[in-house]
Structures are given as structure tokens and as C-alpha cells.
Amino acid sequence: MKKILLMGNPNVGKSAFFSRLTGVEVITSNYPGTTVEYTRGYALIAGEKYEVLDVPGTYTLEPTCKAEEIAREMLKEAVSRMVGEADIVINIVDATNLERNLYLTLELLERPLPVIVALNLWDEARHHGIEIDVEKLKEWLRVPVVPTVAVTGEGFIGLNTEIYKAYAPRVRPHSAEERLLDVGKLVKDVQTIHYRRHTLRDRLEELTVHQLTGLPIALLVMVAAFFVIRQIGEGLIGYLLDPAFENFYTPLLMKLSGWLGGAGFWHDLLVGHLIASKVDYLQSFGLLSTAIYIEIGAVLPYIIAFYLVLGILEDSGYLPRLAVLMDNLLHRIGLHGFAIVPTLLAFGCNVPGIMATRILESRRERFIAATLISIGVPCAALQAMIIGVLGKHGGGPIAIVYAALFGSWFILGFILNRLLPGFSPELLLEIPPYRLPPLRLLFKKLWWRVKAFLKEALPIVMLGVLAVDLLYLAGVFNLLIGLFAPVMRGLLGLPKEAVTAIIIGFLRKDVAVGLLLPLGLSVKQLIVGCVVLSMFFPCVATFVVLCRELGWRDMLKSTAIMIAAALAAGGLLNLVL
Amino acid sequence: MAKKMIVSLAEMRVGEGGLVAGFAAGRGAAHRFVALGIRVGRPITKKSRGLFGGPVIVQAGGTQIGLGRGMARKVMVEVER
């Protein structure tokens, strides 16, 4: 099968382009030998099937020789290797920013590969008063040039007819200076810019990064995001999932329970213990009751809500601005502004969050970011359960949990920044203009993420509940409970049975919080329990990525820090509250 | 009378424009500036400065770019004052 490579600068609408070109069937995978992720899909063009690879955005193909830019290096290595195997490159160019984008184009033309140039964001360029002479550009580059609007699909028919006509131009290798000179001449020749008025969008762009208005707006955005997520989550639970469980699933389970005789090994494993001769979804702890309910009934609604809001923040272009605004704060803990991106991702699930720390340049930064994420950033599943457990006691206890986590995150970062050798690099990043997130792409991405969550979380939750039941039956818990009871009671003020929750927290944190419920804890104990569970030890999936990203030695270091921090924070809360 | 002088991005005033004069940086950093669209001889405008030594934002070509203070000190700009 022939391969098409999509290449271009970051923020040129490449994902929208990819999604327009390919169908629904998309796979994210690691490129052999590297850890850079790319997305793969298939396109049917003029009856022929093509494999389409979405290469991570890059400004140039030239390697820079700086040790701390490993991440950059990996990306480039992957790019140059991919280029060697491709059949056609579609170079996606931001038509509103020809001058910067054409540098990569000229580099690509020097490779022995058929290239097609797509002038994407064509509508935006028109809107900005930018006029590009496509015919002249074609003559200059000697390859097909097609204006496109990936979001609406404009220009894609033209693009498809060019694909099988594409050929490799023969261009001698140039030096960087020569290319820059060429770009300058070229742009002067093909582009005219007309005068344009200040628009509302320009105003908004200025206000959201201004030294006085930027931070208050950021705070407002975050608070609004939190409330929208909670509203959608609660709405889905109250109007859709709870009634569905109540009216359809519970009768089904009760029928199964009756059929199994209401008690016994298999009954307790599948349906769980009946409480007041009824299934209690949070306390019965059966595979078909609690396991299913926690994931589908309690956590899934918040996963949907979270990824919807995150998708809007990502695709609107707000995140780079947030990175600039947060730069100062993050410098205090040895990171720079861009670390806000993995941190926000981790609020959905720590696994992709920690994987995204790869975008940070130095090993030191990655260690700090990954450790802080595992300690201070609760994933959506955990948050859903914390809200579920503490919600009935009002907003105060929830606020205390979040404040404790944020406090630990910051204090620990501050300490790590002082203790670890080395320094943190500086922020340097492009801030793309605000754009309305294309709905099609937004929902497609939401669907991928929700599907990935169900595929990965559900089996582990089942396993977690199974482990609880079997270990409970085997009496292992009693042994461990006896062993750790002094720490639990003396330091944290929790009943010794809470040991079970901590151990299960290694498998799934949401299930672990659920285990606190049958213990009949006071509000204070619930707060301490939630904080300790969040900070103590990452779940097994996070554990695996931590090991992969940091190596086992740093992972152990990171874990030791977590345990110490969790005990310190929990002990302190127990004393203060 | 306005006269030409060379200052770094960090020292530029918000709203001020000029032409990029050069980079007080090694090859690696200079390369990253060029890739992002900050190129010698091309116009650049300072859009905002961060609070308490936070990053500055500039407009270069069609792009807005955020630079930490240390980075901003490495980009030299010819302005008229």
C-alpha cells in the first residue's frame, strides 16, 4: 500500500486535515525504535487505498546539536526515517503565515519525494486580507499547490486529483541561508497583504495574555471549566445513568441474584453482598454490580465531560496562552509554562499526562513533572468518586481535598526544584490565533478518548474488584490490616480497615475510594482518606508508564517521594482538621 | 529626533516595533528562533510583557510567539526612539 505523509509546522490544522482525508478508522502507535507517537489512518482516493501518516508538527528537518533537545531530536529522527519510506508527502502550509511555513516546504523539495503543497486555512487567509497567487507559487515550487480548508473540506476534490499526478522535483541541496533568502524572495513575489481592521478576535487575544487581565481571565476559565464538567457529569448521572441503572439494570441483577440463591461464592463474586436484601452499587462489591457501576455509572459521565471541555480548550488555542500565563508559577517548581499541558491532560488520566511530559526538554523537568502529576493531580475517575463520596457533605470538604493536593503539588515542586541539580530551560513557543474548534474533530477526538478509557479501565476495574473479593475470602487483608494498623490509626486517624483501600488503590483509585464508603467514616476521615489515596502510590497503569518514561531507578525515587508526601499530608490534615 | 538603537526584546516597550538585528545566542537557540519565524532583518513587535518577569509575547511575521525572559534577552532588535 502506498504511504502518504502529512507534514507541516505545528498549528496549521493538520489534525483536521488528517481527519478529513481519512475515515473513522484511526490508530495511534509508536514509531518503531522511537517513542514519538504518530497517528495512522487510511484514505480511499480514486479507487486506490492509501495509508496516511500524521507526522508530529515540525518547523524544520535540520537536526540541531544540543544535548538537552533530545525530544526534538527524536522527533526529527522519526521524521527523517519516515520520509525515507513514504511515497507522497502532503506538505500542509498555513496560508496565513506563508513566510515561516515555506522554509519546511523548501527543505522537503530537496528530498527525492513527490510533494504536494496544501495551502490550508485558505479562508482565514482571505479573511486576514492575505492574497496568494497560487499559479505563481506553483511555478516557483514546480509541484502541485492546492488551496484547502480542512474544516469544511474545501479544496479536497482538487487535492485528490493531484495525488496520483504527484512527482518529485529535482532540487539541489541548499544551505539554511540560501533557503531563507529564497523564502523571502518567493513571499514577496506571490503574496499581497491588504489592510485589515482590528477585529474582535485580536482584542480577545490581547486581553487573554495581557499582564493585568490575563491571569484573572485564566482563573475564570479554569473555574468555569470545573463547573461545566461537574454540571455535565452530574446531569448525565442524574438524568440518564442513574435512572437507567435503577429501572433496567437493577431488576436484571436481582433476577440473577435470585437465580444464584441470594448468597454463596458465585453470588458474592458476581452480584456481591446484598445490603438490606438489595444490591447497593457502592458497597456490594460484585463484578457485575460495583465494578460495572463505578466505571459506567459514576466515572464515565465525568470522563465524557472532562474530555469534551479539554478538547475545546485544546482546539480553541487557549492552552499556549495558559502556558505563557503559568510560566512564572511553574518556574518556581522547576518547570516552565508548557508543563501546564501534560498537567491538564493528567486531570483526565495520569497515563497520557505522564506520557506528554516528553514534550519537556530536560530529564530533570520530566522527573519533576511526572512526580508532581502522580502526587498532586487526581485523574477524572478519582475526582468523580471524591465528588461522589464527599458531595453530600457540601462543597467545603471537596475544596479542602483540592487545596491539600494543590498545596502538596506546589510545596513538593518547590523542594524538588531546590534539591535536584541542573536548571530548567526557558519558554519559547508559538501562540496560534484563536479558532473555533471544528465540531466534527472535537467529537471524533472525544469518542477516541472515551473508547480508550473504556477499553483500558474496565478490565482493570473488574480485576480490582475480583482481587478485593478473593483476597478478602483468603484472609490476606486481615494480615495486612494487622501489619499497617498502627500507621493508619496513629498517624492518619483512619480505621485499620482502610488499609484495604490503600492496597486496592494500586489497581484503581476510583474503586479504592469506593472501598472507604462501607467503613462509616466521619467527614474528616473521608477527607484524609481521599487525600492519602490520591497522593499515595500511583495506580498500576501510571506505575508502568512512570517506569517506562523515567527508568526504574527514578521511578523508585519518585515512588518514595509519593509515599512520604502522602503520609506527611495525611498526618498533617489529621492533626489540623 | 528619533535615533536608531539596538535593544533586546526584554527591553523593548509594549507596542513598540523594530527590525530583528541579531541573536545574542548560540547556534542552537538561534536556530529555534529562526524556525519560529524570528528572522534577522524582519519586523517584530512586542505585544505584551509578563507580570513579575514573566514571558513576553511578540508578533513576528504572521505568528505570535511567547518567550521566557532569558530568551527575550537573546533577541536583539533595532528600534527608533
Image (cartoon, coloured by chain):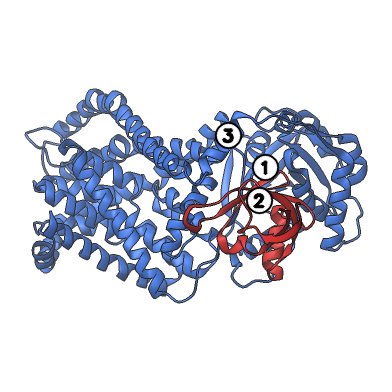
Chain colours: A blue, B red
Q: State yes or no: discs 2 and 3 in contact (Cβ < 8 Å).
A: no
Regarding mark 1 in the picture, which secondary structure is present there?
A: loop
Q: How crowded is mark 2: few (under 14 residues within 10 Å), some or many (20 or more)?
A: some
Evaluate whether label 2 is on the same chain as label 1: yes
Residue A58, horizontal then vertical, whole percent? 68, 54
Q: What residue type is labelled 3?
A: Arg
Most extreme residue toward the bottom, as rendered?
A421
- Report the residue marked by disc 2: A57
Label 1 marks a residue whose chain is: A
Instruction: Report if residue A167 is visible in the image.
Output: no
The structure residue drawn at horizontal position 10% and vertical position 48%, both measured from the top left corner, is A521
Chain letter belonging to callout 3: A
Q: Determine whether A241 is above or below A179 in the image.
A: above
Left or right: A55 as drawn, with respect to A193: left
Task: Give the camera-side residue of A30 and A343.
Answer: A343
Amino acid tagged 2: Gly
Q: Earlier in the sequence, mark 2 or mark 3?
A: 2
Quarter assignment of residue A174: bottom right
State the CA–CA distance, disc 2 to disc 1: 8 Å
Q: Which amino acid does label 1 sit on?
A: Val
Q: Earlier in the sequence, mark 3 or mark 1?
A: 1
Q: Residues within 10 Å of mark 1 (few under 14, many from 20)?
A: many
The residue under the point 19% across, 60% down is A570
- Mark linked to residue B64: none
Residue A393 in view, yes or no? yes
Classify residue A475 by image quadrant. bottom left
| Residue holding disc 3 | A203
Residue A12 marker = 1
Where disc 3 sits, the SS reads: helix
Mark nearest the camera among 3 and 1 is: 3
Is residue A555 shown left or right of residue B12?
left
Which chain does tag 2 point to?
A
